[in-house]
Amino acid sequence: MRGSILSYQQKDPVKLQCEIDLNKLLPTPKQRERFNKKWNDFLESDLCNNEIFKRKENLLKYQSEQLIPTGNNKKPPLLLVLGNPASHSVKEGMFFSFEGNKKEHRFWKILRKSKALDLPIERNLSVEEQNYRRKRYLLELKYETPFRVGLCVFISIPSKASGKWSGVAGVQRLIGAKALKELEKEECQRVIESAKKFLTAKGVVVTFQKNAWNGLKSDCDVSYNIDDAKNGKLKGTLKDTPGIPLIGVPPTRLSGPCSEILRQLLEEQGYNLKYNKT
C-alpha cells in the first residue's frame, strides 16, 4: 500500500517492508539537517539496525513487523497494537523475540496471566525455536484461549529496545515531533485497514501505548492518561470503524497492571476467559 509519506508491503507472514519518502516527511531544510545529524547515532544504537535499515537518496527503507492470521477458527478476533518494533525482534523475525539475556519477553507472560493468549511453548527450547513455534502457532491458530489473535505496531519504524533511542520516543527524537504527527496519520490508516480485514463484529482492538491509543481512538473518546490506563478507564471505539471496541492498557513495562487491566477490560466486553487447557 502507498500513501504520500509511507508505503509498505507484507513480504512474509510477519515481515513488513516499508519505505518512507524523506522529502515528504521532512520537507524543510532545518528538519532534514536535524535528521541527518541524528541518523548515525540512531543507526549505531543497535547492531541490528544495519541489517534492517537502508537509505537510498531520499528514501528510507526498512523492515518492520505485522502478524495477521488469514485463517479463521470462528473465535472472536483480538488485535493487539503495540508502539513500535524492537530492532532485534525485527531481525529475529518475530514479535518480542526475547529480552535481556535472551529471556522470554514479559509480553508473553502478560498474555498468559491475563488469559488472553497462552501459547504451548516448551521452556527448554532455544530462542530461535521458541520464536519459530510462536509464529507457527499464531499463524495456524494452534492454541487454546478464547481469541484469534493478531499483532501489529502503530509506528512501523523499529528502534532499540532500551535507552536513548528506544520506543516511539526514540523515533520522535530522530525525526522530530512534527514529522511524527504526519507519519502517524498514515500509520493510523495502515492499522485501521489491517483491522478491518481481520476483525469481525465480535472483535476488539487493544492498545499498549500512548500514541497508539490517541491515534486510533474515536474523536469522542478520552485522550491517553497513564492513570486512566492503570485504572481501566481507556475504553472507546476504533476510529472510523463504528461498533469495534478499542481498549487501552498500561505499557508492557508495567507487567502486573498490564495483565490485570487487560483481563478486566476483556471480561467487561463480555468475553469468557475461564477456559480449560488441554
Image (cartoon, rainbow, N blue to C red):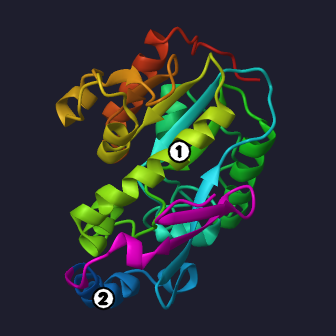
Q: Answer with the quarter of the image where residue 41 lies.
A: bottom left
Where is residue 5? Give x, y as percent. Answer: 46, 66
Q: Nearer the viewer, residue 102 or 166?
A: 166
Q: Secondary structure at mark 1?
A: helix
Query: Image quadrant for the N terminus?
Result: bottom right
Which residue is depicted at the point 34% across and 81% down? 42
Where is residue 82? Give x, y as percent. Answer: 45, 47
Q: Earlier in the sequence, mark 1 or mark 2?
A: 2
Range shown magenta: 1-30
Q: Which residue is mark 2?
A: 36
Which residue is depicted at the point 29% across and 43% down? 210
Which residue is depicted at the point 46% across and 37% down? 110
Query: Image quadrant for the C terminus?
Result: top right
Q: Nearer the viewer, residue 38 or 251?
A: 38
Q: Which residue is mark 1?
A: 191
Q: Answer with the quarter of the image where residue 18 lies.
A: bottom right
Where is residue 113? Give x, y as percent. Answer: 49, 30
Label 2 Cα crowd, 10 Å radius (few <14 / some 14-19 / many 20+)? few
Q: Secondary structure at mark 2?
A: helix
Q: Nearer the viewer, residue 218 or 85?
A: 218
* Residue 58 seen in this snapshot: yes
Q: Which mark is residue 262?
A: none
Left or right for 252, reference 29? right
Left or right for 119, reference 51? right
Where is residue 189? Give x, y as percent. Answer: 50, 46
Q: Is residue 207 above or below residue 100?
A: above
Label 1 Cα crowd, 10 Å radius (few <14 / some 14-19 / many 20+)? many
